[in-house]
Image (spheres, rainbow, N blue to C red):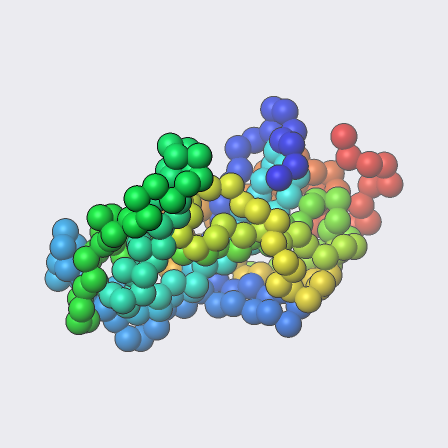
Amino acid sequence: MPPKTPHAPKPAEFHIIRLFAGKKSWQAVASSSTMQLGGVGAGGVKPRKEVLLLGKALFGRERLAFEIQEVDNSPALVQTMLKKAQNLKDSHLSCIVFGGSDFGGDSTHHMLPHRQGTITDAFEASRATELAARYSLQVKFEDVSHIEIDGDTITLSLSVAPTCYVKHAGSPRSDSLEIAKDITGGTKTISFTHSTTVAHSFCNSKALNFAAVQSILTEQSPRLAALFKGLPPPASAEP
């Protein structure tokens, strides 16, 4: 990730319900089929599948980011995700403690019990969501050449394709993103529809309405301030 600009505001999140990047598109949606929750959240239900979208303004890095997660809450896949996370943790600890040797040759003592049936443990489902793969499409402020606004839908025309990052499945949500293969086909257009609701956004998100984020963007970037008004960007480079 690029270095941060000093004294910049903290990153701000905003709700997205649709995202288009070239031939790829996503809609924040939950399947009609649900899973019964057991454990601490017993009695509740959770969609079997969810698509989670979130926008971010990374002021310190002068970027917009669009994040995507596709989650399956079925019991078997929740357990698969938790097992993957445990295996990654065991592998990491093995490298630290035993210098990468396969000491003992087996980590079955860490294996999680396999849950059968149609009931998903609420805590495990929440943790599996955090462990699911997350993609981030990032656009530099300076690469935005035109902004078109149509109601709640904003289209960004870019001078270069966005940079794709990924947090791999099984890794903690706090893990750093890594540069990934472009999943957009080299598109130079990103379109998103923002929303005032938190439906199907990332868990525990403190996302703002996009209008509030846009206000900060225009304060921080003369380029974006001009483009949001339909004006040509300043000729000089931003500080």
Q: Furthest residue to the top?
A: 7
Instruction: Give the position of the C terminus as an image quadrant.
Output: top right
Instruction: Give the position of the N terminus as an image quadrant.
Output: top right
Q: Position of residue 204 (x, y in %)?
A: 35, 46
Q: Furthest residue to the right?
A: 235
Q: Residue at x 53, y 55 (%)?
A: 135
Asked whether 213 or 3 is in front, the reply is: 3
Count of marks overlaid on the render? 0
Asked whether 232 or 111 is in front, the reply is: 111
Q: Position of residue 126 (x, y in %)?
A: 29, 53
Q: Residue at x 17, y 71 (%)?
A: 117
Does residue 150 lie above or below 178 as drawn? Answer: below
Q: Is residue 131 visible?
A: no
Q: Is residue 122 left or right of residue 239?
A: left
Does residue 205 lie above or below 116 as drawn? Answer: above
Q: Furthest residue to the bottom?
A: 33
Q: Residue at x 75, y 49 (%)?
A: 143
Q: Is residue 71 visible?
A: yes
Does residue 96 lie above or below 74 as drawn? Answer: above
Q: Is residue 100 left or right of residue 33?
A: right
Asked whether 89 or 216 is in front, the reply is: 89
Q: Position of residue 196 (x, y in %)?
A: 44, 55
Q: Position of residue 41 (x, y in %)?
A: 16, 54
Q: Is residue 217 left or right of residue 45?
A: right
